[in-house]
Amino acid sequence: MLLQSFASLCLLAAATFAVPAQEKRVHHHADLSDHAHNDGQDFQYDHEAFLGKEEAKTFDQLTPEESKDKLGKIVERIDLNKDGFINHSELHYWIKHRQRRYIEENVNKHWDDYDKNQDDKVAWGEYKNTTYGFYLDEEFDDIDDKATYKSMLNRDERRFKAADRDGDGIATREEFTAFLHPEEYDHMKDLVVQETIEDIDKNGDGKISLSEYIGDMFTPEEGESEPEWVQNEKKHFTDLRDANKDGFMDFNEVSQWILPGEVDHADNEAKHLIHETDTDKDGKITKKEILANWNMFVGSQATNYGEDLTKSHDEL
């Protein structure tokens, strides 16, 4: 059965709230690019934002002609309503989608393990039997920590039901993605907060005390002195986390901690690309306008070679 492997998958899929160490429970949006956003130097940030980090590397190997040809086909995919224009909403959706590809690839990697009848859906029964089947038959009697695995099963079922938006007990690929990566979906975020509280709240009172908050990060060995960062975290708890100063973090305070409001970088990048490309300033861009500025959206051997020549000349 896949119970052991699933336990590892759970740790990977929900690493940010399963690893007890300082800020690792906080869910930050992934960066759009590893490069600085400086169009005066190069367009590498825009390339990775528009294509995704891995796909941008493949475009670097193309000629300008090949790069423009592929870009033209991408533009047709971005134009969801097929009106011949790319508006902000369509470009924003595309950039967000490209940034989520690593999540989709993770789901696809494990999909066939659970979709036993190959109907391109995963029923709760399929998932439960694949993950826990043998142990269910034995009522978890062969497992040392029986209570923990029963709790895992109950938690999985609750999360599956939350992800299953139409309540039919069967997850589409999108619903199963929400099950494995709940932090990526607005309708799952309350559950992420609830699971975080359950992880840290040792006395079961539904809130997190200072000792529970610190205990989630640091358990001293006998005679070990408290490091400075622990003192800093205690101050953060008192000054920042516990907003109403009642000595605890409640649901809303935990939400503010692990799901902080952040700048929507995909939104900003969509606005930037439209601003730089929209020659007639009608607030939307055409395929012609995009291809006229193709090197801002995608790269190629030639453009990178040109950049290398420029950098080499500057260095000399």
Image (cartoon, grey):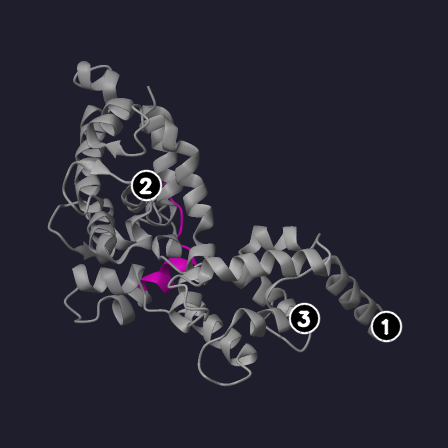
Picture quarter containing residue 112?
Answer: top left
Q: Quadrant of the C terminus?
A: bottom right
Earlier in the chain: of badge 2 and badge 3, it is 3
Res 33 seen here:
no
Real-space CA distance between mark 1 and mark 3, rounded to the nearest whole angstrom: 15 Å
**Which residue occupies the foreground of this view, 24 or 116?**
116
Task: Give the answer, above or below, for where 23 lies relative to 40.
Answer: above
From the image, tell me which residue sits under label 3: 42
From the image, tell me which residue sits under label 2: 173
Q: Secondary structure at mark 1?
A: helix
Q: Disc 1 marks which amino acid?
A: His
Identify the residue at horizontal 27%, vertical 33% (top origin). Answer: 122
Q: In the image, residue 297 lies at what x, y percent? A: 59, 66
From the image, tell me which residue sits under label 1: 313
Identify the residue at horizontal 42%, vertical 72% (top origin). Answer: 87
Task: Give the answer, above or below, for where 120 lies relative to 311.
Answer: above
Picture quarter containing residue 121?
Answer: top left
Q: In the image, residue 227 lies at what x, y percent? A: 42, 55
**In the image, is 264 to the left or to the right of 199?**
right
Q: Disc 2 marks which amino acid?
A: Arg
Earlier in the chain: of badge 1 and badge 3, it is 3
**Which residue occupies the foreground of this view, 265 or 273?**
273
Q: Quadrant of the N terminus?
A: top left
**In the image, is 128 to the left or to the right of 50?**
left
Picture quarter containing residue 158?
Answer: top left
Q: Disc 3 marks which amino acid?
A: Asp
List the single residue furthest toward the left. 205
Query: Which range is magenta?
Result: 222-234
Identify the residue at horizontal 38%, vertical 55% (top origin). Answer: 22
Q: In the image, residue 220 lies at what x, y percent? A: 36, 45
Real-space CA distance between mark 2 and mark 1, rounded to the nearest whole angstrom: 50 Å
**In the image, is 301 to the left or to the right of 191?**
right
